[in-house]
Image (cartoon, rainbow, N blue to C red):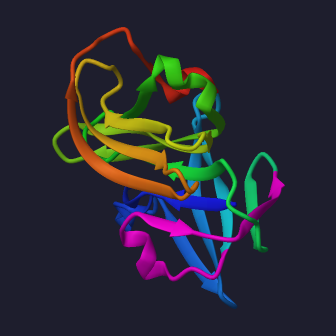
């Protein structure tokens, strides 16, 4: 299995929104998860073997991982050879605009399973505090199929930048960031609606 982490996931670490620890070749990403009922944040941990902290500054693919554990506050991957399948995991966050969200075409809803939606309190000097979204998802695509994930506002009125996942004829996965203006309201759905 493969894991894709987009660069937005680990951006803006200065206010402890994302904490990265490395020990014995294993990286732990700790992302706070805000509970609107209690006004408290507990950390969600992602344990990922054989990755360097510097790799998390850009979009990164990790190969030959299997999901070993998935609990309320902990996701653990281990290294194990796994042939290329039609499914991947992805950790996605939009840092393009505030407040942020991620949209997909409604017709592609069957291709995405939201495993976790993590929300934490972030801040912008001009706007103050807001809740930011990180999505841990599973994507399933057939060969020659594509799926755009639009990094946008909390609505689908301004879709212009997307991470487009695709599989070629041989089954190889690719993720490209594309500028794709699209103003077709009503044809898109937030990943938050798939939780």
Residue 33 in sight in this render: yes
Q: Name which residue lies at 81% across and 49% down.
A: 71
Which of the image's four quarters has the C terminus? top right
**Magenta residues, start to end:** 49-70
Q: Nearer the viewer, residue 73 or 36?
A: 73
Q: Can the viewer see residue 15?
A: no
**Residue located 74% across and 51% down the image:** 73
Relative image position of residue 135 (x, y in whole percent): 54, 42
Figure disc tally: 0
Q: Is residue 128 left or right of residue 56?
A: left
Front-most of residues 175 and 52: 175
Q: Quadrant of the N terminus?
A: bottom right
Residue lying furthest bottom: 24
Relative side of 13 to 110, left or right: left
Could you tell me residue 60's position as x and y percent?
46, 67
Which residue lies most toward the front here?
169
Residue 95 rendering spot, x and y as whole percentages = 31, 47
Relative to 181, is 91 on the left or the right?
A: right
Determine the residue positioned at 52% across, 50% down: 169
Q: Residue at x 42, y 54 (%)?
A: 175
The image shows residue 18 at horizontal and vertical percentages of 49, 62
Q: Magenta stretch: residue 65 in it?
A: yes
The part of the image, by quadrant, that contains residue 160 is top left
Front one among 102 and 187:
187
Vertically, is 38 above or below 125? above
């Amino acid at each position: 299995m493969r894991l894709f982490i987009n660069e937005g996931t680990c951006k803006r670490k200065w206010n402890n929104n994302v904490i990265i620890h490395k020990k014995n070749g294993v990286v732990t990403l700790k992302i706070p998860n805000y509970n609107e009922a209690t006004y408290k944040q507990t950390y969600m941990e992602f344990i990922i073997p054989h990755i360097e902290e510097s790799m998390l500054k850009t979009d990164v693919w990790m190969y030959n991982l299997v999901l070993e554990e998935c609990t309320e506050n902990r996701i653990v991957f281990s290294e194990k050879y796994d042939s290329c399948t039609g499914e991947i995991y992805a950790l996605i966050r939009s840092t393009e605009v505030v407040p942020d969200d991620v949209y997909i075409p409604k017709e592609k809803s069957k291709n995405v399973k939201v495993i976790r939606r993590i929300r934490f309190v972030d801040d912008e000097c001009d706007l103050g505090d807001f809740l930011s979204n990180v999505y841990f998802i599973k994507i399933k695509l057939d060969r020659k199929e594509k799926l755009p994930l639009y990094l946008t506002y909390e609505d689908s009125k301004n879709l212009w930048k997307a991470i487009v996942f695709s599989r070629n004829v041989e089954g190889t996965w690719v993720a490209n960031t594309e500028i794709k203006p699209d103003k077709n309201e009503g044809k898109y759905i937030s990943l938050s609606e798939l939780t």
